[in-house]
Amino acid sequence: MKTSNGDRVFSGSIAQLYEQYLVPLIFDPYARDLTGRLASLQPSAVLEIAAGTGVVTRHMAARLPDYVSIVATDLNQPMLDHAMSIGTSRSVTWRQADAMHLPFDDGTFDAVEATDIATSAIGQRFGVGQVTGKIQAIVIAATRNA
């Protein structure tokens, strides 16, 4: 299924406004909780889908051991650019990727994190089954409406 260009580009100041207002109010509490749950699973390679401005990524980088690889993806390059400009406490691979067409081989990751994607238009179209079938991973997901 194709996504419209409107689904792909959050340009201008949207990433900054998202980080300034939505992250502290909505996403940071979920990021803290999910990172704790993920750490308890002791993964060695984590894929983050829909990383946005990187709030969960920053928590994972701070909480997971250094040997755990983290690949943070988002459909929207300006959101990733903003996340990279904020940075993380350790190395993270940032990659623009469409959750509908993940560019990774099977078995690359043993955990997948997708905060709030299930309530997005993409999440409603792609669902957890496609991720687990392709990547053979534990999926950790959170939504405000769960």
Image: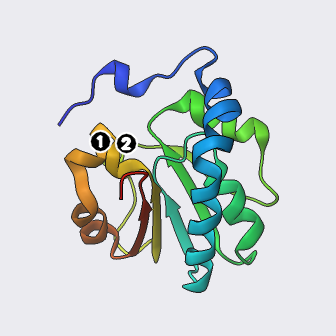
Q: Residue furthest left?
A: 1
Query: Is residue 109 at all visible to an observer of this figure?
Result: no
Query: To which residue does mark 1 refer?
Result: 122
The residue at the point 58 percent across, 33 percent down is 79
> Could you say which is closer to the camera, residue 98 or residue 113?
113
> Could you say which is closer to the camera, residue 69 or residue 113?
113
The residue at the point 42 percent across, 63 percent down is 141
Residue kind at label 2, given as amino acid type: Asp
Which image quarter is the C terminus in?
bottom left
The residue at the point 43 percent across, 43 percent down is 97
Expressed as whole percent of the image width and height from the top left, the position of residue 88 reads: 77, 53
Q: Within 10 Å of the Cα at label 2, are there few (<14), some (14-19), or many (20+) other Cα atoms?
A: some
Q: Secondary structure at mark 1?
A: helix
Residue 71 placement, left or right of 59: left
Q: Residue furthest right?
A: 89
Q: Secondary structure at mark 2?
A: loop
Q: How is the image coloured?
A: rainbow
Which image quarter is the N terminus in?
top left
Residue 17 vs 47, above or below: the answer is above
Residue 105 vs 87, above or below: the answer is below
Residue 8 placement, left or right of 79: left
Query: Is residue 108 at all visible to an observer of this figure?
Result: yes
Disc number lying in front (1 or 2) = 1
> Could you say which is closer to the camera, residue 138 or residue 106?
138
Count of marks, rendered view: 2
Residue kind at label 1, given as amino acid type: Ile
Q: Earlier in the sequence, mark 1 or mark 2?
A: 2
Expressed as whole percent of the image width and height from the top left, the position of residue 142 reads: 44, 60
Per the rendering, the mark at residue 111 is none
Query: To which residue does mark 2 refer?
Result: 98
